[in-house]
Image: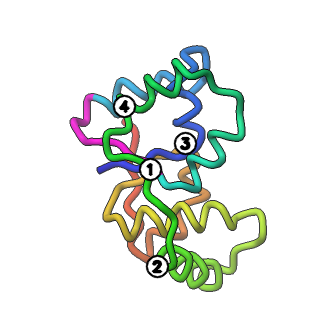
Amino acid sequence: MIHVDTNLLIASVDPTHGYAKLWPELIASGDSFGASAIAWTEFRSLPVSHDQLRALDQLLLGGILAYERSQADLAGELFQKIGARRKNRLDTMIAAAAILAGAKLATVNQTDFEPFRAFGLKLYRFE
């Protein structure tokens, strides 16, 4: 399972987006895709058509992972352990969700998520 971060969710419905070119490699990996409710919330903060959502549903067969207490507890611990700042709070939540799901995280912001690798986050490495 690969969890997809916000920028890649946006790129999945916008072929003109700069990161849209990364999707063929992700699809070729043969893994299934999902996203955390946090990344989904960020994505849904943008205007998206019904047709785009329907197409994305066909891609995210792993679904949208609910954000529950276990993710919140881990995110809080990670926030403290890496000395994160307020601007990193959502990244901490996304990382916690991927860790607990046992999913790799596909993100274009690898450096933002690198500190979480020491706590079990697996990052999808683009070729």
**How many neighbours does mark 4 have within 10 angstroms: few (below 14), some (14-19), or many (20 or more)?**
some
> Which amino acid lies under the numbered mark 2 shown in the image of this protein?
Ser
Which badge, 2 or 4, comes first in the chain's sequence? 4
Left or right: 32 in relation to 72: left
Rendered view: 48 above or below 96: above
Q: Which residues are magenta?
A: 28-35
Closest to the observer, 88 or 70: 70
> Which amino acid lies under the numbered mark 1 shown in the image of this protein?
Ile
Residue at x 35%, y 64% (from the top left corner): 101
Q: Disc 3 versus disc 4: distance between alpha carbons?
A: 18 Å
Q: Disc 2 versus disc 1: distance between alpha carbons?
A: 16 Å
Which badge, 1 or 3, comes first in the chain's sequence? 1
> Tag 1, which secondary structure?
strand
Q: Which mark is residue 64?
A: 1
Residue at x 32%, y 46% (from the top left corner): 62
In this figure, which residue is indicated by the disc labeled 3? 108
Say if mark 1 contacts mark 3, CB within 8 Å: no
Instruction: Answer whether residue 65 is magenta in the image.
Output: no
Which numbered mark, 2 or 3, is in the foreground of this view?
2
> Tag 4, which secondary structure?
helix
Closest to the observer, 114 or 71: 71
> Which amino acid lies under the numbered mark 4 shown in the image of this protein?
Leu
> Tag 3, which secondary structure?
loop
Closest to the observer, 43 or 123: 43
In this figure, which residue is indicated by the disc labeled 2? 70
Residue 20: image x %, image y %? 51, 23
Rendered view: 84 above or below 21: below
Which badge, 1 or 4, comes first in the chain's sequence? 4
**Quadrant of residue 47 within the rendered picture:** top right
